[in-house]
Image (tube, rainbow, N blue to C red):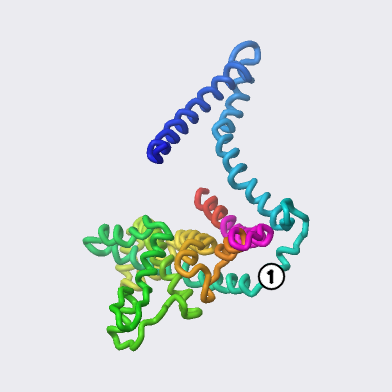
């Protein structure tokens, strides 16, 4: 079937199925399980009203259980087993975790992930806050915001391909199509550099791609937060003789601190799961390995499901505290 037609059929069937489920489930609830008639009509109506929300939640609960809870449990099980030649698994306990901790590539991935966690959320949030403040002060700010936000519409793989061209290297006798090498030669460089093979620095070149993407996200959220600041506080600061920098750092930033932290933690979660950029640009070579790419290598290249699952559990354990912290902050904001 044509993919477009298949997508349309899926959407139609999905909508019809949802409507049918909610209609029929409510019909059965009100006429069969808790009928609103007879001597217990009042009690049945109360019970039906208590059960009804769970009917709406049931599809989401089933989907979360099938696509979230079950994979987590299965991944944990696989991380404690080892594949046996000829098929099947054998229980090995924590042996996969012990082996993983002994591998230099794992510690290289951990070191690089820590570098990403320090640099990317900080710069993305800072650039997003700066652009949000500046674009609100210029006449063509909406156009600027659209251009800055545009990378968010590009997939990570697409962004990696674009930036791989930026870092492209050609022999000395050829024209440099990579923008970075063209600038390097223009400003007096003798030979073009293979930027993605320079240890340590190549990690920062990869980080630049994610910063470029996430700055637009941070800008949109923080711009909305800045516009929500009461004008009275800014006017009072101006009357007291505060300058633009004082107003920004002492009046505006403290009032949107919670939003800044939410943006920071959201980008942090994205960084912990980063895979596409590294896979498409260096594939973890030249000391650019990260945890998600390490997991992929073990699962699908080395065919070591136990070690790959152990790496997946490490990523989940690193992400979970940040998710819990975000949820708690969101609940505090709703109170």
Left or right: residue 277 compared with residue 301:
left
Residue 37: image quadrant is top right
Q: Which residue is mark 1?
A: 101
Task: Find out whether residue 308 is within the magenta segment.
Answer: yes
Q: Position of residue 332 (x, y in %)?
A: 54, 52
Q: Position of residue 264 (x, y in %)?
A: 48, 63
Task: Find out whether residue 191 is within the magenta segment.
Answer: no
Query: In the picture shown, does residue 74 fall above or below 184?
Result: above
77 or 27, which lies in front?
A: 77
Q: Is residue 314 visible?
A: no
Q: Which residues are magenta?
A: 300-325
Assess disc 1: are there few (<14), some (14-19) or many (≥20) residues with their C-alpha within 10 Å of its C-alpha. Answer: few
1 or 265, which lies in front?
A: 1
Q: Position of residue 93 (x, y in %)?
A: 77, 59
Q: Position of residue 247 (x, y in %)?
A: 35, 69
Left or right: residue 282 compared with residue 59:
left
């Amino acid at each position: 079937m044509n993919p477009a037609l298949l997508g349309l059929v899926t959407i139609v069937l999905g909508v019809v199925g949802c409507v049918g489920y909610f209609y029929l489930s409510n019909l059965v609830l009100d006429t069969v399980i808790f009928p609103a008639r007879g001597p217990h009509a009042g009690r049945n109506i109360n019970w039906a009203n208590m059960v009804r929300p769970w009917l709406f939640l049931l599809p989401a609960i089933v989907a979360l259980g099938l696509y979230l809870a079950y994979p987590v449990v299965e991944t944990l099980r696989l991380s404690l087993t080892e594949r046996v030649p000829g098929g099947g698994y054998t229980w090995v306990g924590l042996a996969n975790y012990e082996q993983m901790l002994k591998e230099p590539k794992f510690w290289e991935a951990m070191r690089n992930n820590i570098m990403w966690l320090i640099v990317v959320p900080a710069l993305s949030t800072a650039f997003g806050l700066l652009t949000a403040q500046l674009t609100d002060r210029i006449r063509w700010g909406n156009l600027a915001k659209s251009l800055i936000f545009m990378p968010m519409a590009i997939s990570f793989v697409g962004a990696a391909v674009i930036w791989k061209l930026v870092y492209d290297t050609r022999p000395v006798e050829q024209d440099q199509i990579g923008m970075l090498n063209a600038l390097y030669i223009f400003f007096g460089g003798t030979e073009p550099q293979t930027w993605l093979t320079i240890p340590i620095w190549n990690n920062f070149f990869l980080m630049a791609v994610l910063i470029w993407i996430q700055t637009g996200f941070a800008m949109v959220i923080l711009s909305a937060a800045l516009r929500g600041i009461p004008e009275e506080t800014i006017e009072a600061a101006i009357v007291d003789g505060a300058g633009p920098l004082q107003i920004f750092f002492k009046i505006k930033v403290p009032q949107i601190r919670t939003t800044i932290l939410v943006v920071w933690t959201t980008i942090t979660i994205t960084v912990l799961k980063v895979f596409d950029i590294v896979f498409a640009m260096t594939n973890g070579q030249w000391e650019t390995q990260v945890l998600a790419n390490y997991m992929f290598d073990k699962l699908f290249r080395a065919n070591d499901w136990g070690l790959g699952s152990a790496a997946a559990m490490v990523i989940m354990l690193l992400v979970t505290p940040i998710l819990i912290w975000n949820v708690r902050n969101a609940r505090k904001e709703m109170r």
